[in-house]
Amino acid sequence: MNFHFKRAEYYEGRFPTFRKPSEIGFFSLDEERKFHDDNRQLKYIILPSDMNNVYMDLNIGYENAIRKEFAKKEKLDTMLSWILYHQKEVCNNFHVPNSNKPQIDFVCFRGLLTTIGTTIYENKEDWLICATKFKSMIYLCAFDTDDQIRRREATTEREKLMCSWGYKFEQYLAADTPVSKPNLSVPVNEKEEYCIVLKGRLDKHTLLYSAEVDGKDPLYNNNRDKDPQSTQCYSELKTSRIITTERQHINFCRFKLMKWWLQSFLVGIPNVICGFRDDSGIVRKLEIFPIPEIPRMSQNKWSPSSLLNFSSCFLDFVKKCVVKDDPSVVYKFYWKPGNPITCEELIQPSEYEILPEWYINNLKF
């Protein structure tokens, strides 16, 4: 089955129904990517007093940094672990009247939803998403395409260095407690993560998804009226090259602001804090981008309603394709720029299996 979707303009218009996401849980991944059902990796964002005049060398400690192993496929395992630990909470949060089963249409990571939404504006990178249905819930998991594997294997030393800059920038601004300072003396460990688990809804699709968050605003703790399930306390940290030409400004608006907006909007994060760096990896100034203002700042290079309307249409398509409620059956969705999205049922999925036996055997609802 194929999905011949239309140009981005077709999906503009009415902004789809999107229920504000609520945080229903969290977990941590340690320096060895081991799952912990706690908040040990939660950080707090500490901003400098003068954001227009900073000097942050993102190269420091590069040779000692602990790299994330992108070739090792974790699939949905970390989130599945959280679900098994919190089956009662999942049922309570997704309860529907006259039913003992939670109403969940899709389980996935936020990054996958971002990939789907930006498809209509993407003209370079392909993607591969697999889906399996178990107990009425559809699990979505992204896999590397052949092109993505080739690009990663061809990564130059300069590109590896530039990839590390984002992690180092986070270390400059993230502290372990609301009253401490960031610790720059330890090596950056790219394997560590703090993730939140969210309940959301896009049109008629109920979503259970997880997202890594960079840190919490320590001032939010002083808000007595705060909602314990609100995600307004978090901030997203990004780096970008200092903009010196019109061309760079156009690309910044067209691509970076679009992804920043969608990533943060899906989680309900209010601000992106960007460190603008030079070509040597030195951050010279910081700027805060409020999420509600980003679409206006992007100068109509993309449409927020298009991103979400297309996402909803794609999820409709997945529901039509993924009909067998059987964790041993996997449906493979593949897209390459300029082509329709294709769906293929895999009877013997092997490497594309999403749900492990330990999850299938222990899920009780």
Image: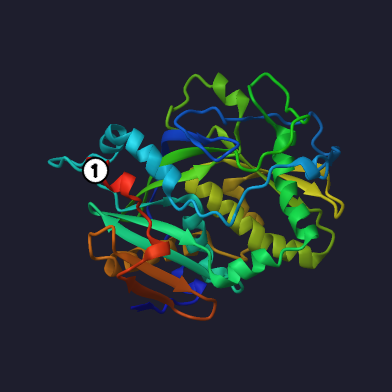
Q: Which residue is drawn at the image coordinates 53% and 22% (left, top)?
A: 223
Q: Is residue 230 left or right of residue 91?
A: right
Pick whichever, 58 or 353, lies toward us. Answer: 353
Q: In the image, residue 83 lies at what x, y percent? A: 35, 39
Q: Which amino acid type corresponds to the residue marked 1 in the rendered image?
A: Pro
Q: Quadrant of residue 133 in the image? A: bottom left
Secondary structure at numbered mark 1: loop
Q: Which residue is drawn at the image coordinates 49% and 81% (left, top)?
A: 339
Pick whichever, 27 or 218, lies toward us. Answer: 27
Pick whichever, 73 or 235, lies toward us. Answer: 73
Q: In the image, residue 149 lies at what x, y percent? A: 60, 67
Q: In the image, residue 284 lies at what x, y percent? A: 84, 43
Q: Quadrant of residue 173 in the image? A: top right
Check disc 1: other Cα within 10 Å, few if <14, some if 14-19, many if 20+: many
- Would you say residue 295 is visible in this rendering? no
- Would you say residue 122 is visible in this rendering? yes
Residue identified by numbered label 1: 102
